[in-house]
Image: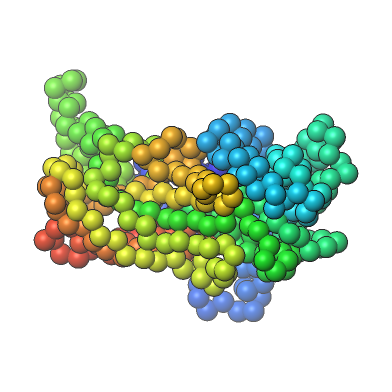
Amino acid sequence: CLERGRDILLNTEAAADARVSTRSPSNMSLPGKRKRQERGDERDSEYFDCYSNVSVHEEMIADEVRTDAYRQGILRNAAALRGKVVLDVGAGTAILSVFCVQAGARRVYAVEASAICRQARQVVKSNRMEKQITVIEGVMESVELPEKVDVIVSEWMGYALMYESMLGSVLAARDRWLKPGGLILPASAELFIAPINDPTTDWRLDFWGQMKRRYGVDMSCMTSFARKCIMGEEMAVQLLSGEDVLAHPTRFARLDLARVTLDEIRTLRGSFSCYCFGMAHMHGFCIWFSVTFPGGDKPLVLSTSPFLEETHWKQTILYLDEPVPVLQDTGIRGHITMTPSEKNPRHLRVRIDYRIGAQEKKTKNYRMGD
């Protein structure tokens, strides 16, 4: 969940070789497979428990860019919602369900697997919408609805879009409960990648070399260790600005939620190519996403771009092993692949094959979670 996401940023300071592998042997017997299923159930339980904490919902709703985009995206589609039946997947506190009723929905089924659904019922009652909104406690893939729905709404996006893998629940709901030609809000998602310079990383790598001057202690030997810790395999979630982006971004994936399949979202891949604006140290790549709501004179886009207003998703950084100097028109090209972790499908793995200028081609694997 999002609070665990904050731990991801803190974990970037841990040494990569200090981690202990917990991967199970591949030659597991049938009882071992049952144990793996039990571990999967435990992981889901931990995930849903995380969303029972008020801090997570406070952070999401306090993100005005996010919450206003959903409110406006729903109200813009009032004509499609008026008198219709809506399914809110992962409803949380049911705020999106309330927006749907305000837009004219006749009935909303708010499905939430975590204990926050109890507070959702109170929110519904406080807004006098008990006749329109039914809060259902349960996992989307296993709940039963009394009818098909005309619209699905969900805020399913995680860090780098795919962290937490909630999109699968939305697609499962679509395949089982959405009427033919029904509407999904948001309707599509896009992923972007660009090379970046991270001023904070520059400062942190230079820090140890300053100790001789500051305190009379030569600690420059710590620099290589710091580089290994900071620029490791763990993806970092932090805020960047447009000034930190070194070249035009490339869109490497687009998802049409009306058509994309569960198999297709298990592996997202794409190519990228760009040319640097000027001289800088390249520290890595940055990933961000946008989602689009149809309706109105033009679509409404909720973007997590570093060129736009901050959201709680910030941006996701994938560091190189060491800074690489680039010049104006230095070419950067490569291929990116995103997959769920084999150990925990709610966690994320990314592989980037890239070439910077005339350097040889390199590959680096990244992780978010476990």
- In the displayed structure, 44 sits above or below 218; it is below
Q: Nearer the viewer, residue 70 or 232?
A: 70
Q: Nearer the viewer, residue 1 or 194?
A: 194
Q: Quadrant of residue 131?
A: top right
Report whether 22 appears left or right of 155: left
Report whether 98 appears left or right of 43: right
Report whether 343 appears left or right of 99: left
Q: Kindly give the residue lying farthest to the front in the view shown.
A: 297
Residue 129, percent across and down?
83, 39
Colour option used: rainbow
Report whether 240 appears left or right of 311: left
- In the displayed structure, 136 sits above or below 313; it is below
Asked if residue 280 can be seen in this view, the reply is yes
Q: State the residue at coordinates (64%, 79%).
A: 30
Q: Quadrant of residue 357?
A: bottom left
Asked if residue 283 can be seen in this view, the reply is no
Q: Quadrant of residue 215?
A: top left
Residue 241, percent across and down?
33, 36
Q: State the residue at coordinates (36%, 65%).
A: 270
